[in-house]
Image (spheres, helix red, strand yellow):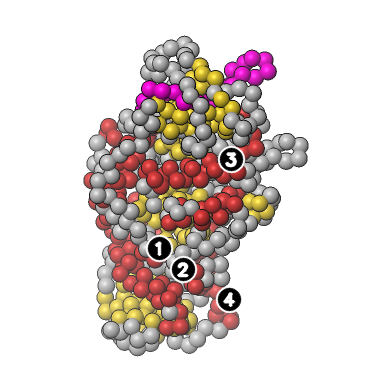
Amino acid sequence: MENTTTNIALGTTLTDRGCHFRLHGPQLANLFLVLPEHPDEHETAPEMPRLMQKQPNGDWTCFISNVQAGAAYAFYTLNADNQKQWLIDPHAHHVLQRHDKIPYWTAQVTDHYFDWGQAQHPKIPSDQTILCEVHVKGFTALHPDIPPAIRGTYLALCHPVMLAYFKRHGITTLQLMPIATKADETHLQAKSLTNYWGYNPLAWSAPDARFACKHPVDECKTLIRTLHEHGIEVILDVVYNHTAEEGHGGPVFHFKVLDPQTYRHNQDGQLLNYTGCGNTVNLQHPPALAAVIQSLRSWVTHYQVDGFRFDLALTLGRDGELFDQHAAFFLAIQADPVLSQVKLIAEPWDIGPQGYQLGHFPDGWHECNDVFRDTWRSYWLHNTASAEIAPLLLGTQSLFPAVHWPSKMSVNYICYHDGFTLQDVVSYHQRHNQANLEQNRDGHPDNRSNNLGIEGPTRHPGIMKKREQHKRNLMTSLIFSFGIPHLLGADLRAHSQLGNNNAYCQDNPVSWVNWDSHTTTDQFAHWCVWLIQQRQATLPRFIQALTELPESMIIHWHVPNGSPMTASDWAERQPFACRIQIQDQDSLCYLFNPGNLPVYFQLQGSGWHCLIDTALQAPEIRKIRQSGCLVRGQSMMILHNNHR
């Protein structure tokens, strides 16, 4: 053992002579490092405890020579009664779950060498980004063309079958639901359920072994390298707002003992719960901020990820009780030469005071736009006025002005992992979460859904036809709105969760994407491919023009006879058109008919081609040869006119 300085990383730093260990524990009276000599054997007690050295700044450090990659390690401290409290390294890069052993969790020293070959960051421009959210296990667990031995793993997600699938669908960016090592909440363990989604982090920087065949670190890197080789970005959904230690009475893994100030407390010393998960990480506390920044940098430098989607990101920007777009976390990201260069997406809310801040994050941050989701669902499936959807079509510029594009844009979505899938949006009026064993009280009660006549699955041809048409309406509204479209990967396969809108604990076919081939499913998949192709071929030019030369763009809003819309027209849910023109170059025309009867729209000029008609099951481009066109009931059309 030798003395060390504290300029090494938190957790472990491997050298050719051995390994440095460093944890921040300012209130501890002692801290021991344990290196089990035979981590794969069923020893009854770990061996070789070593007392670490406390530094003036509250860090505990230790250097052990001859330690190599793969060595298991854990920590413990002795309390006033001389009882051991086992601790896991919160900064670990590889975590092992040791059933029937003490300690239950251990970390593993990691060598991050990896051959990245010629793979590079794809660097997809924001106006060309098509986000697709997937769960590493759930997206391939049932895929019949993936070898059974690797289904549900990192390696399955980059199998040639999946690469061809993503490329065919025009997916530029995969957004992976949490892959950091998680622990199951105590209330789920009591019900023999598991946190399938993974929003309960145990170690922020360790890829979860549940998605690996053998080696989670190397297999996770293989996934990202392979996707990069095929021009596909990877964004990680990360959870730095809370940890798996829950609230008072919850488990103790690390920070509760190492540094309780990592979490926010009230005046009585009780843990504040702005996350709904029992604790709230306090990024005003410099050691906590340093730990999060180190973790983010690890994902970018060691795994080459292209960006992050931050769960409950409002929590990270709290200064005291209030949100501050100049909070220490945002300033640290902005000043970091690595992190300031990647894509950043915020979920702009939590459950604390003033816990909704859509549009208020700093420049450089895109934001998940739930208003987009709710309003478009209400428009097509209920009775929302035209005035409500018009701003969303053009990028929600009241909150995301075009002058800030492309560095700050609305992330538009109809469905996310939490909530109904698209199939369920048009199949269920109420949530059906009984399988979660919470008496159907969990999950959001306001889904803006519509079963269109029958609750759940049906073979009624009329209802099935309506459901497919509204799926096309909603998907078109998403893909052809200005902003960054976010797709739920399960929606491309018309997957149903049987009405469960909070399937976080359903590690089974409720959540696993159904790859069975059906006529309607295949038709919708083909239609989505076409839709994304047409979007990528046309819309980026309009987004760029509105960003760079807004004065060159002319936007007309009119009723079917060509007259400008009046205040009364905007206040109703009536057929209307939006024509967007870039001087004498290109024009797009959106024709909306939410009513039941067909409506004839008068067009301005000639040379129009129909790119999208949601009334059709089979997509096609057709030329409009007359001075107008008929838009069938409960459908929309998108026309393009290339004046060049």
Q: Secondary structure at mark 1?
A: helix
Q: Nearer the viewer, mark 1 or mark 3?
A: 3
Q: Can you say which quadrant of the picture contains the C terminus?
A: bottom left
Q: Nearer the viewer, mark 2 or mark 4?
A: 2
As measured in the structure, the alpha-carbon distance from the residue carrying label 2 to the one carrying label 1 is: 9 Å
- The answer to whether the residue labelled 1 contacts the one labelled 4, judged by CB atoms less than 8 Å apart, is no
Q: Amino acid at mark 3?
A: Pro
Which residue in the structure is indicated by mark 3? 287
Q: Secondary structure at mark 3?
A: helix
In the image, 347 versus 529, the foreground residue is 347
Q: Amino acid at mark 1?
A: Ser
Q: Is residue 254 above or below residue 84?
A: below
Q: Nearer the viewer, mark 3 or mark 4?
A: 3
Q: Is residue 522 visible?
A: no
Considering only order in the chain, which callout, 4 or 2, is on the residue closer to the N terminus? Answer: 2
> Which residue does the image show at 68% across and 18% down from the upper left?
80
Considering only order in the chain, which callout, 2 or 3, is on the residue closer to the N terminus? Answer: 3
Considering only order in the chain, which callout, 4 or 1, is on the residue closer to the N terminus? Answer: 1
Which residue in the structure is indicated by mark 1? 126
Residue 321 horizontal side relative to residue 449, left or right: right
Q: Please report the bounds of the magenta region as a residue range.
A: 62-91
Q: Is residue 251 above or below residue 125?
A: above
- The answer to whether the residue labelled 2 contacts the one labelled 4, judged by CB atoms less than 8 Å apart, is no
Which residue in the structure is indicated by mark 4? 571
As measured in the structure, the alpha-carbon distance from the residue carrying label 1 to the one carrying label 3 is: 33 Å
